């Protein structure tokens, strides 16, 4: 049914999207918390930076990543020399690019759920003897769980289809960075690749749709679990 | 017992209070909405930083002299107006939340086995929070606060968000807490009815300051209280002892000063301490012994003083021997009867207009109180 190359592309897309979510989730929670609960100086700037990938052309994001995380970039060079980690032309780099692109989606979802958590409950927890970390893990985090899960699933589904930033940053290497949309693009560029392109499009379509349905389903389940 | 001084400037508002209470019991912070009661409660709990604060409870300094305990270290059981139960935990989870966080060095005086029956929570333990009624939520919030082994229970209008029926459902539990647990409480309220039922000591607040503070029976005669509760709610609060109970009519005889009152009192026992409120507008005065009236309660006394209440009415303070009663009469009646200090007078009050509440008090306190009546300023 599917060729080895197609299976590869699906597998890569799933693994890269998953890694991008795992990597960016904790950071997104911290950023969302800073943006909602802290009277932070430079909050406007942080907010803008987080949302930049939404408005920038993905190619620009890929280019910026290349500058920062390239072998001679300030972060990429340090990563390579200290840990031997290479970002460009690897699936790790693809996950990074995907994470950067879906980060605003995730922060938004988490932020909305955090805004819905009554700060009065934190005060109640304080008077009952809970310190700051304790309050966060025993009250705030469980109550924002629906938003975290919804954000993660949406980011995962969006990450399956990231194209511009990925191809700019890590190129289009079969078996390493050629995810679904890149494989689809390649198929379209190849004479006689129409059937493959159609199959890949259908797979993308079904994955995206199931992702969105799953996100809604999970959010409902969790909301019920939390008694709302 | 408590010593609280706090200063807080906010835009267009200054809170500046000094409260000193020597007896344990229930201290009511009473005043109109917006007078700074909740701000003060939050400062006491440590949720709101004050510009200056000195808070001492039972000899433990919570704030002041340059050091301020954080809210989580103060051990103040705060019951909020809106309960603030954790929606992701069931009733049991909520009750245990504070209890789990009690430091091992603190002796656990209050247990779930004690609190559950006291607050009627046994059948609620496995319920989800969103399945509770408003009254049940507040009872759970009370239990949760108590199980955190607080040195003080701080209740911020816990009944304000409930309708009258739910309020009646929760009030008896609060009375039980006061009488059985002997835990000091600060009760924030703008409902005089609640203060009347629960408080032992009242702090009258207005526009961010303390107008007056003292025992409820003293304050009930205070002109400042009239300014807050309005002329129709003014009335003497008196302490008495049940001397006889008539099972047939449901009437209890209560000794107050040198007189007796017959009032409706549920579950009264002979010897029980009772607090009654006699609304000034319900008190009828007579300058000769009245006869052939339906009124069952006739007390004898002497006019202590007459003061103008407003343009057309006077407030008459009547000494009934060891206690003062307030009567509000028209200026015309006051002139016709020639009311003046020292005039012997009969005080009439209909049984049905007396509000009485059983109230636990050691008998000797009641006695001390009667003696103290001799030296009042008004």
Image: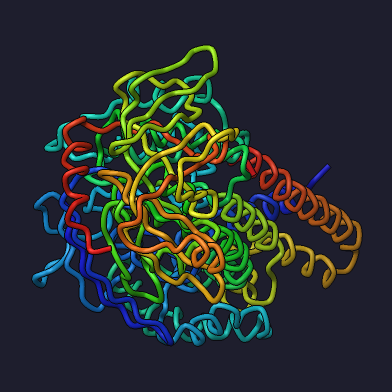
Residue at the spot 58% in from the left edge and 58% down from the top edge: A16
Q: Up-down: is B262 above or below B188? A: above
Residue drawn at (26%, 33%), measured in percent from left and top? B361
Q: Is residue B7 above or below residue A141?
A: below
Q: In the displayed structure, does residue B72 sit left or right of residue B170?
A: left
Q: Does B44 sit left or right of B82 as displayed?
A: left
Q: Looking at the image, which residue sits at the far top?
A: B248
**Quarter holding residue B243:** top left
Residue B184: give x, y in percent of width and height. 25, 43
The x and y percentages for residue B212 are 30, 66
Residue B128 spot, x, y in % from top left: 57, 32
Image quadrant where residue A68 sits: bottom left
Q: Can you tell which quarter of the image residue A79 is in?
A: bottom left
The residue lying toward the viewer, choosing from A112 and B316, is: B316
Q: Nearer the viewer, residue B17 or B59?
A: B17
Q: Tell me the residue at 59%/35% (across/down).
A: B293
> As drawn, is B364 to the left or to the right of B178?
left
Q: Nearer the viewer, residue B51 or A64?
A: B51
Compared across the picture, whether A1 is left or right of A43 comes to right
């Amino acid at each position: 049914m599917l060729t080895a190359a197609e299976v590869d592309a699906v597998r890569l897309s799933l693994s890269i999207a998953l890694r991008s979510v795992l990597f960016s989730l904790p950071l997104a929670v911290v950023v969302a918390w800073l943006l909602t609960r802290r009277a932070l100086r430079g909050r406007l700037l942080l907010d803008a930076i987080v949302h930049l990938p939404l408005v920038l052309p993905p190619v620009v994001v890929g280019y910026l990543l290349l500058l920062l995380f390239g072998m001679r970039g300030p972060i990429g060079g340090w990563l390579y020399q200290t840990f031997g980690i290479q970002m460009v032309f690897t699936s790790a780099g693809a996950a990074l690019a995907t994470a950067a692109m879906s980060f605003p989606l995730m922060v938004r979802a988490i932020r909305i759920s955090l805004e819905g958590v009554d700060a009065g409950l934190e005060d109640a927890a304080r008077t009952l003897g809970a310190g700051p970390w304790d309050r966060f893990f025993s009250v705030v985090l469980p109550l924002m769980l629906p938003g975290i899960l919804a954000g993660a699933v949406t980011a995962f589904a969006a990450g399956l289809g990231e194209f511009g930033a990925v191809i700019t940053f890590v190129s289009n290497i079969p078996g390493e960075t050629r995810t679904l949309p890149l494989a689809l693009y390649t198929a379209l560029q190849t004479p006689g690749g129409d059937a493959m392109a159609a199959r890949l499009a259908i797979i993308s379509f079904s994955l995206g749709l199931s992702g969105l349905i799953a996100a809604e389903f999970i959010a409902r389940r969790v909301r019920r679990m939390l008694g709302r | 017992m408590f010593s609280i001084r706090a200063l807080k400037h906010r835009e267009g508002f200054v809170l500046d209070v000094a409260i000193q209470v020597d007896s344990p019991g229930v201290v009511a912070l009473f005043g109109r909405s917006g007078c700074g009661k909740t701000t003060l409660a939050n400062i006491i709990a440590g949720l709101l930083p004050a510009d200056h604060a000195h808070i001492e409870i039972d000899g433990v300094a919570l704030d002041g002299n340059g050091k301020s305990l954080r809210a989580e270290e103060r051990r103040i059981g705060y019951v909020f107006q809106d309960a603030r139960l954790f929606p992701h935990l069931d009733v049991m989870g909520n009750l245990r939340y504070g209890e789990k966080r009690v430091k091992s060095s603190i002796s656990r005086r209050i247990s779930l086995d004690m609190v559950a029956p006291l607050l009627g929570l046994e059948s609620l333990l496995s319920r989800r929070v969103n399945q509770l009624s408003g009254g049940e939520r507040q009872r759970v919030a009370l239990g949760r606060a108590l199980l955190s082994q607080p040195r003080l229970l701080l209740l911020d209008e816990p009944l304000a968000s409930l309708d009258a029926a739910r309020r009646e459902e929760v009030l008896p539990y609060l009375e039980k807490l006061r009488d059985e647990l002997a835990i000091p409480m600060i009760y924030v309220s703008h409902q005089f009815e609640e203060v009347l039922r629960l408080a032992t000591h009242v702090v009258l607040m207005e526009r961010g300051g303390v107008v007056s503070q003292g025992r409820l029976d003293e304050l009930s005669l205070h002109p400042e209280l009239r300014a807050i509760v309005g002329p129709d709610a003014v009335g003497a609060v008196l302490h008495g002892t049940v001397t006889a109970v008539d099972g047939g009519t449901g009437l209890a005889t209560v000794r107050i000063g040198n007189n007796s009152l017959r009032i409706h009192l549920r579950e009264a026992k002979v010897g029980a301490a009772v607090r009654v409120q006699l609304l000034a507008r319900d008190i009828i005065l007579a300058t000769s012994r009245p006869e052939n009236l339906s009124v069952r309660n006739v007390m004898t006394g002497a006019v202590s003083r007459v003061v103008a209440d407003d343009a057309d009415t006077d407030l008459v303070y009547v000494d009934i021997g060891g206690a003062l009663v307030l009567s509000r009469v028209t200026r015309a009646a006051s002139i016709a009867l020639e009311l003046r200090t020292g005039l012997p007078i009969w005080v009439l009050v209909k049984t049905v207009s007396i509000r009485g509440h059983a109230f636990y008090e050691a008998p000797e306190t009641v006695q001390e109180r009667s003696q103290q009546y001799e030296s009042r300023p008004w």
